[in-house]
Amino acid sequence: MNRTTPPPIKDAVEFEIKLRPYEKYTLDNGIPVYVMKSDEQDTLQLELVFPAGSWYESEVLEAAATNFLMKTGTSGSTAKQINENVDYYGAYLNRNAYHENATYTLHCLSKHLEVLLPTLQEVIQDPIFPEEELHIYQQNMKQKLAVNLQKCDFVANRFIDKYLFGDFHPYGRVSTMMAYDALQTEGLQAFYKKHYTYNNCKIFVAGHLPENTITLLNKYFGSVLWNDASHLIKLDLPIQPAEEKKFRVFNDENGVQGAVRVARHFPNRYHPDFPKMLVLNTILGGYFGSRLMSNIREDKGYTYGIYSQLYNFRQTSAINIQTEAGRDVCEATIEEIYKELKQLQDEPVPQEELDLVKNYMIGSMLGDLDGAFQVIQRWKNLILNDLDESYFNNNVQTIKNITVEELQQLAKQYFTPGDFYELVVI
């Protein structure tokens, strides 16, 4: 071996990316369990997913409040006892409510799964929604909202979603003091009974699994028809975007920065242009070396950071360019954003830049698939959106094979300034 000669560099796009297959089991009551095994570390992640997001709520904030308060008391344990039991074993029980789904996720050492499952079962199958815990939740969330409403960045995120999707659409609906005050224990219990049922549950588990994992899951979640069967109908909710496209909002007279948002609608992930736009969006503002960052941060010095994001919602999507800039340069920042959009329409992306972005995206994907926890998240995203491995493979091939001509055509179609909503909050 000649150590004076460096090894050849292999571009990330030359690697073949395969999504490791999962194992699927079905509990006695029909709950599907998707398993990704790994012996790398003696830890595991267990996630229960329910169609219990904001899309299904009849009252604003009902989904998030139900998800949060399930952990604050059962008929046999108080919130303190639940938290102490989880903490004693060095575990972490997290919960989240999104637009379509809500989750409960347990992270723990593999050897402690059996002793922690009864606590998780209590939280999922026997919450009582104590009145005092609801009052504490309301007070805390209203205080948090009051603080956040003083921040231009927070206010801008609320407004741009309302402009894009409408006040009453789940994607555009926002929290208010009145909505928190209106929450009632009875409403939360009814929402829980309807959505957190055995037939609406999917389980995703990854890591170093004890040999009796499926037996344990069957014992605590598959042996009975808990909460009875509930057949949900996902309503077709129309988007009602704002008619005007330009907005200026005054929020903090003493602030030195303003929040800038430039956004437009875009087809959802099922559209053939979606994976292509992932590449174009990365070039525009999807990573630290992007055009927006190079121009508006590095060259002009208007901001510490600017990014472009492609929403990954189920019904529809959007492109959202966001940053915080000095109050005196917010308008100039918007001008530079439009210049970058127009340049992508008028001039083909240099092949060298495209190759760099392709390698960045494939390299990031390789990193995201490093470990069972990351792989099961990929599978979860596919399964919950009624997709399969071919969708993942097609996206990989799109990143590897997309041409500068395709990107320019995409920019001409979707980067027309008049299609964008424009918001500055100062």
Image (tube, rainbow, N blue to C red):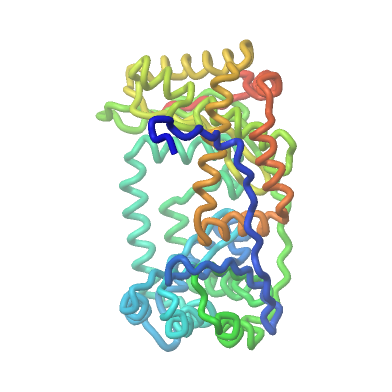
Q: Where is residue 261 in the image (x, y as percent from the top left)?
A: 48, 29
Q: Confirm whether residue 137 shows in the render.
A: yes
- For this view, does 300 lie left or right of residue 110? left
Residue located farthest toward the top when viewing the structure as drawn: 346
* Quadrant where the image shows the N terminus: top left
- For this view, does 253 lie left or right of residue 307? left
Q: Where is residue 2 in the image (x, y as percent from the top left)?
A: 42, 34
In the image, is residue 40 above or below residue 18? below
Q: Where is residue 148 in the image (x, y as percent from the top left)?
A: 35, 45
In front: 291, or 145? 291
Instruction: Say which residue appears at 58% left-offset and 41% top-offset.
Output: 311
* Quadrant where the image shows the C terminus: top left
In front: 199, or 233? 199
Q: Confirm whether residue 426 shows in the render.
A: no
In the image, is residue 136 above or below residue 119? above
Q: Quadrant of residue 141?
A: bottom left
Instruction: Say which residue appears at 43% left-offset and 67% top-offset.
Output: 41
Instruction: Say which residue appears at 52% left-offset and 17% top-offset.
Output: 340
In front: 390, or 53? 390
Residue located farthest toward the left when viewing the structure as drawn: 254
Q: In which quarter of the image is residue 74?
A: bottom left
Instruction: Say which residue appears at 55% left-offset and 82% top-offset.
Output: 211
Q: Where is residue 116 in the image (x, y as percent from the top left)?
A: 43, 81
- For this view, does 297 lie left or right of residue 340? left
Q: Tag count in the figure? A: 0
